[in-house]
Amino acid sequence: MSTVTDTPPTRRRDQHRPKLSDRARAERALGWKLAGPAFVIMLAVTAYPILQAVWLSFFRYRLTDPDSREFIFLSNYSVIFTDPLFYQALWNTVFITVVTVAVELVLGFAIAMLMHRIVLPRRTLRTIVLIPYSIITVVSAFAWLYSFRTDTGYVNGWLNTLTFGAWDASFDWFGSWLPAMGVIMISEIWKTTPFMSLLLLAGLAQIDGAMEEAAKVDGATFWQRLFKVVLPNMKAAIMVAVLFRTLDAFRIFDNVFVMTRGANNTETLSTLAYKQTIDRVEIGMGSALSVVLFLLVFAIALIFIRGFKVDLAGSK
Amino acid sequence: MSRHRSRSRVIVALCAASALVGLTACGGSEDSTRLTWYINPDGGGSNPEGKGQAQIAAQCTEQAGGAYSIEVQLLPNSASDQRQQLLRRLAGGDASVDLMSLDPPFIPEFSQAGFLAPVPEDMVETFTEDRVESSVTASTWNDELVTVPFWANTQLLWYRKSIAEAAGLDVEGGNVTWEQLVEAAESQGVTIGVQANRYEGYTVWINALIAGAGGEILVNPGPDLDDIELGLDSDAGRTAANIIRSVADAGVGGPSMGTSDETVALNLFQDPDTSGFLVNWPYVWAAFPANGVEFIDDIGWAVYPATSDEGDPAPPYGGISIGVGAFTEDPDLAYQAAECITNHEHQVLYMTGTGNPASRAAVFDEPEVVEQFPMADVIRESLEQAVPRPQTQFYGDLSTAIQREWSPPSGVTEDTPAQSATLIMQVLRGEALL
């Protein structure tokens, strides 16, 4: 894998820079001119709302009652961190993230291997695999909701037939925590596994075929080749795929919103933040929750990049 | 080369399209006699000949003779989503919200936030004449009429005559209680379609049960947070909890009682195998033939079940009132339009066209209404007895907190009312999440 790049190893420690040449200075100025507008827009559309959310999170502020807006500093945060609902949502979010990312990694890798090996019909196969990912999440959530519901669904009917009647044909999938979470995760996995497999396919494609052949000649079995040659060589691609999916899964919203709206203790952090901000128009509390969610996502990214040394630039 | 050309063609097309959109948008704001009416979806959709709100808009435009024109915008399906969209527009000072179809429980919140233009004093009488009591109560906040009653809804008890007869239940003759219903459904192996999903419809049921037991969720409707006194932790609250629990325990609420809304309940009643009883809005009467129900002759209707032997039933109240946005350019014009929308002729049209009952009592005497709705009298009777949901600007929080504590119905106990009261107060004081 191309984690070994041409960047000089001393780049970060190089504090005493020599004076820039005219050309370097001109290039830097040109760079700012080219990238500057985009940089300013980025600041306007990301930094500004984030800072405003942080500011608003210090207030008790209800949109329908703007007159009683009150500065309460960290009170919203203390409510959040003492409320069992927050920990329930956090646990649900972590649970969904861990399960879906793990399943997607295994499934996605299998599909990537398949796509990598199969020569014909390569393009058709890759297109088919991508179909779930191209479907809007809300739409796929409704599709899964309707197929599992007791009145419109077919899943119960199938399970009932396949188990020769042992399965209760009127089982309410959304009536309790575990089955509801199960359907939410199935929908999530079905939808985003293609994304995972594409990222992994890119990693697979970068492995030098000669290494695998050499291992084969030396008598390595399939599993030995997989664990000793293939996986170590695509570690960066795997980590990037897992990072992207983890950040994505941690913000899960659509499936929960469409299927349960947080009923039966299936609340996640995003739906909780949505409820405070949009439903209750409690802008202060909602902002505080969003800030907490942001910090958690930020921490995950930091752990991956620092802890596992994921090189985002090198694995493109 | 050809690729390049086709791309530039696409760009030109995009620009043209956006220019067009921009122009129409500008055109809209320049014409001050054009009113936008945000409507909740009904049977007519946005079809100007669909006998719904869109047709009323078209007719009023015509009758106004150029004084104003009304254009409709569809709101989302669920009441909560409708509230959200209107709330966000109005919080942003959106002047395009001239008229809106408002669900009654949200009226205090909108009014208290200053999102409604005051009703002109000389029109108050016009807007309250001939209206059923509950519709005026629901359109009033702080002793002032703040919206215009348009249509008024109430739930009825729908039942299979054959099943009731087999169970020895005299539904038509007198007030049936929930206890009797559960017994009858259990003995006949049929279901009672109820709404117990974690959504607004569940609060409707809970409120009806508590009110039917002579209680109130909110003892003192009023604007101040400090004055709020809840009546959940009471005998009436516990009676309601017991009824819900008994429906769940007997298994007569259907296999997915905890996630059942109006549609799920209707499906349960339409299924010949499980069909027994149903509490639902009168729209179901039009839905039965449309959904190919074969036992329509066997379907009866009655006033909502009573909570106990002693008290009167307290049927749920719903419907729509017309609100005028606070930021509209010409509130007087909008109220003129509201007068046209809610006049007798249009309420007859709306009731016969969509199945949604009128707020004007005289509409129920119209021959075409009586012919189409054999239960018109029962609806009017039910509307006179109907009890609106608690009136408070914090209704959204109150309702959501109740739904949370009372879900799932199989987990409801005698402690649930008290727990929900505690949660509501914590949430309102900003001490808990919801």
Image: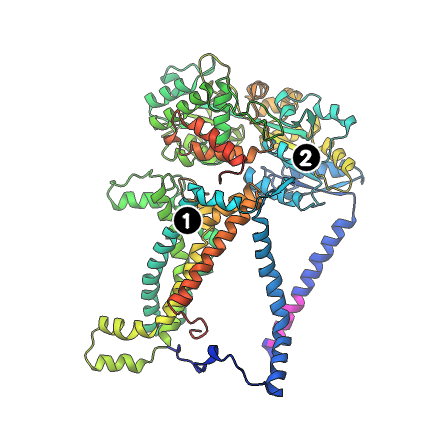
Q: Is residue A246 above or below residue B190?
A: below
Q: Is residue B233 above or below residue B200?
A: above
- Tell me which secondary structure the magenta stretch mostly adopts: helix
- Other residues around mark 1 within 10 Å, as few (<14) / some (14–19) / many (≥20): some
Q: Is residue A198 visible?
A: no
Q: Badge 1 is on which residue? A: A90
Q: Chain of mark 2?
A: B
Q: Nearer the viewer, residue B105 or B42?
A: B105
Question: Circles 2 and 1: CB distance less than 8 Å?
Answer: no
Instruction: Choose between B238 and B53: the one closer to the eye.
Output: B238
Q: Is residue B57 left or right of residue A106?
A: right
In the rendered image, which quarter is residue B350 located in?
A: top right
Is residue B351 shown left or right of residue B241? right
Quadrant in the rendering for residue B346? top right
> Magenta residues?
B4-13
Dot 2 falls on a residue whose secondary structure is strand
The residue lying toward the viewer, choosing from B52 and B131, is B131
Could you tell me residue A108's position as x and y percent? 35, 63
**Which quarter of the rendering shows the C terminus of chain A?**
bottom left
List the single residue furthest toward the left.
Answer: A219
- Seen at 39% across and 70% down, the residue is A309
In this rendering, the answer to whether A268 lies above or below B291 is: below
Q: Position of residue B161 (x, y in %)?
A: 42, 20
**Circle 2: residue type:** Gly
Is B158 situated above or below A246? above
Give the residue displayed 72% in from the left and 33% down from the top: B338
Name the residue nearer the viewer: B237 or B100. B237
Structural distance between the alpha carbons of marks 2 and 1: 40 Å
> Disc number at residue B323?
2
Relative image position of residue B386 (x, y in whole percent): 56, 21
Residue at 52% of width from left, 47% of height from top? Answer: A274
